[in-house]
Image: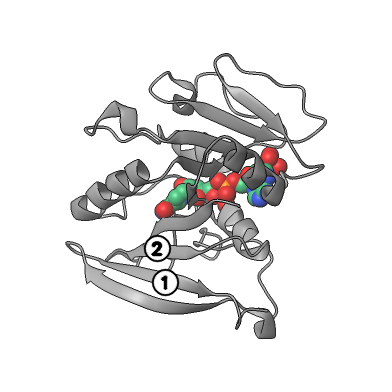
Amino acid sequence: MRPHVTVNCAMTADGKIAGKARKQVRISSPEDLERVKRLRADNDAILVGINTVIADDPNLTVKGLDPAKNPLRVILDSLGRTPPQARVLDRAARTLIATCDECEAIWPNVEVVRCGKEKVDLRKLLGLLADRGVRRLMVEGGGETIWSFFEADLVDTYLVFVGSEIIGGRTAPSPVDGEGFEDDAMIRLELLDAVRLGNGTLLKYEVLRDAAH
Ligand SMILES: NC(=O)c1ccc[n+]([C@@H]2O[C@H](COP(=O)([O-])OP(=O)(O)OC[C@H]3O[C@@H](n4cnc5c(N)ncnc54)[C@H](OP(=O)(O)O)[C@@H]3O)[C@@H](O)[C@H]2O)c1
């Protein structure tokens, strides 16, 4: 069985996950940052796309909690662009880089799996993760990665923190970028919860499979 997939991201009040320079901006409130840390600890693996690694250089750990709770870090990187000095390659937690069949890149202390031709094949990757004991996967972004999970119908829970900022910009990324669905094929969600966390709101949705597509 594939892992349960939770998408988690933070967007501004105008629906952007970063500014037009595509660099990390602080959107989450301190309360939300704490929640994200606990959510990471509750998942077996956290996944991001390579553009997020390059733009934000996240460490994807549960700093301040028991280091044994650090989930496996998973990077989608078809062309082997993960920089050798990236924080996700430090020894704080295990890391798996998912790349394409033709990519020959290797990194020290990292498991590399090759699945897919031009992009990483997400369904195959989830199978490989399940084989490694991953039951719960958290997808943290960015917009292209989240789109691919929705497009492949692989999202179960969607969590979005809505901060209290406006950043604007036609080209600033949003939680779900990619090509987008045709109007009649959009994904339908059920709102499960809305909770104020400091100066923002956490929205929790379940993906409605029967109504989608
Ligand atoms: N606010 C938030 O919650 C949050 C969280 C995370 C990121 N961000 C922001 O998001 C932005 C980066 O997002 P992004 O959309 O540009 O990129 P991204 O989702 O981080 O990475 C996308 C890249 O991953 C690789 N990839 C490989 N297989 C893929 C697949 N099956 N599906 C999708 N991608 C695949 C592709 O590059 P290759 O072809 O080279 O492999 C693709 O271009 C940054 O500005 C960052 O700050 C915000």
Q: Residue at x 49, y 23 (%)?
A: 89
* 76 with respect to 90 (left or right): right
Image quadrant in which you'd find residue 19: bottom left
Report the side of 96 relative to 199 (left or right): right
Q: Where is residue 195 in the image (x, y as percent from the top left)?
A: 23, 70
Do tag 1 and tag 2 residues touch (Cβ < 8 Å)?
yes
Q: Quick one: label 1 or label 2, which is nearer the N terminus?
A: 2
Determine whether 166 is above or below 133 in the image: below
Residue 168 vertical position relative to residue 33 in the rendered view, above or below: below
Q: Name the residue under label 2.
A: 159
Quadrant for the C terminus, please: bottom right
Considering the numbered disc 2 on the image, is that residue within a helix, a strand or a loop? strand
Q: Pointer 2: residues within 10 angstroms few (<14), some, or many (20+)? A: many
Residue 108, given in percent of the width and then of the height, sits at 58, 14
> Does residue 48 appear anywhere in the picture?
yes
Distance from label 1 to label 2 (Cα)?
A: 6 Å
Q: What element carries label 1?
A: strand
